[in-house]
Image (cartoon, rainbow, N blue to C red):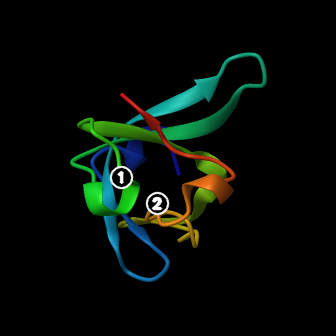
């Protein structure tokens, strides 16, 4: 799959919760690899950010086709912020 095919795809967790839509890709030019997905129209109840978008690590992606499926982490909902290993980057 080409990176450009990810644009405008809806992103869902592996439990079926809507996360957002892919707006752009984050690429590490030194390592020449995809490192994140920039999302818009985000589910603010899920990501708990005050912005219109967020960047999620690409390693959360489980599959991509007609939609993108990411891992649903137990702490995505922000219930226990002290134990969060990593948060999406807001923009």
Q: Residue at x 61, y 58 (%)?
A: 60
Residue 73, percent from left and from top = 58, 68
Residue at 45% x, 83% y is: 15
Residue to which mark 2 is pinned:
78
Q: Position of residue 83 (x, y in %)?
A: 67, 58
Instruction: Tell me the residue that label 1 is attached to.
Output: 48
Q: Is residue 84 visible?
A: no
Q: Position of residue 17 (x, y in %)?
A: 35, 75
Residue extending farthest bottom: 15
Picture layout, residue 43 above or below residue 72: above
Q: Residue at x 35, y 52 (%)?
A: 48
Tell whether 35 sits left or right of 41.
right
Q: Is residue 29 above or below residue 37?
A: above
Give whichever of 43, 35 is nearer the camera. Answer: 43
Question: Residue at 55% of width from left, 63% of height from top?
Answer: 80
- Which image quadrant is residue 62 in? bottom right
Note whether residue 70 is visible. yes
From this view, report whether residue 27 is shown above or below residue 7: above
Q: Earlier in the sequence, mark 2 or mark 1?
A: 1
Q: Residue furthest top?
A: 30
Q: Are marks 2 and 1 in contact (CB under 8 Å)?
A: yes
The quadrant in which residue 32 appears is top right
What is the CA distance from the residue labelled 2 to the residue labelled 1? Answer: 7 Å
Characterize the local packing of mark 1: few (<14), some (14-19) or many (20 or more) Cα atoms within 10 angstroms.
Answer: some
Check the picture and name the quadrant holding the C terminus. Answer: top left
User: Under tag 1, what secondary structure?
Assistant: loop
């Amino acid at each position: 799959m080409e990176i450009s095919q990810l644009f405008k795809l809806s992103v869902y967790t592996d439990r079926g919760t809507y996360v957002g839509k892919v707006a752009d890709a984050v690429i590490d030019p030194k390592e020449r690899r995809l490192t994140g997905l920039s999302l818009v129209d985000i589910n603010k109840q899920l990501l708990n950010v005050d912005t219109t978008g967020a960047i999620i690590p690409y390693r959360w992606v489980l599959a991509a086709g007609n939609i993108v499926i990411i891992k649903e982490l137990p702490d995505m909902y922000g219930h226990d912020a002290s134990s969060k290993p990593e948060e999406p980057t807001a923009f």
